[in-house]
Image (spheres, rainbow, N blue to C red):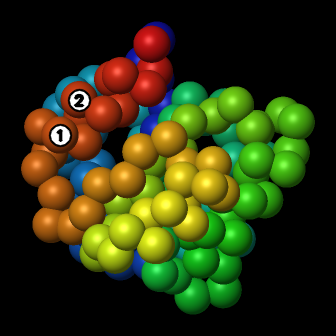
Amino acid sequence: MNKKVLIIDDSAVFRKIISVHLRNAKFDLIEAGDGIEGLQQLANNSIDLIVSDMNMPNMDGISFIKKVKEDPKFKFIPIIMLTTESQPEKKQMGLDAGAKAWLTKPFSPEELIETISKLMV
């Protein structure tokens, strides 16, 4: 059975780009347009890893991570931040909130797949 990845990004185009690469790498995917949708998908699906943007409407990536890490059912799911934010203080905020990795857009599909594979050991 393939591992299931939840992709959270407010750009439908960007979600599709990520989806193509991850499907080619044999991952199953679920998509959400913001942190609130992400929490709903998490509650309704068995998720192995989350890839989340930082800047989104309704609930940003940092707030999303904090909510996930507060819940005993989900707190051990690895989260990768994939965002345009590259400032060290933003990255530290994400890591402090519970992200396991931080990648910046534009991203290398190979780097994303490698990072996911390392976190799903």
Under mark 2, the amino acid is Glu
**Which image quadrant is residue 63 in?**
bottom right
Q: Amino acid at mark 1?
A: Glu
Kindly report the distance in space between the C-alpha atoms of the residues bearing marks 2 and 1.
5 Å
Q: Residues within 10 Å of mark 1 (few under 14, many from 20)?
A: few
**Front-most of 72 and 85?**
85
The residue that mark 2 highlights is: 114
Residue 50 shows up from this direction:
no
SS label for mark 2: helix
Asked whether the beta carbons under mark 2 and mark 1 sit within 8 Å of each other, the answer is yes
Q: Residue at x 46, y 73 (%)?
A: 90
**Residue carrying label 1:** 111
Q: Position of residue 98 (x, y in %)?
A: 63, 49
As displayed, is residue 1 above or below residue 37?
Answer: above
Q: Position of residue 44 (x, y in %)?
A: 75, 45
Circle 2 crowding by C-alpha within 10 Å: few under 14, some 14–19, many from 20: few
Residue that lies at the very extreme toward the bottom in this rendered image:
57
In the picture shown, does residue 86 fall above or below 15? below
Please identify the quadrant where the C terminus is shown.
Answer: top left
Horizontal side of residue 90 vs 108, given as left or right: right
Residue placed most toward the observer, 50 or 33: 50
Residue 56: mark = none
Q: Residue at 35% across / 22% down in the picture?
A: 118
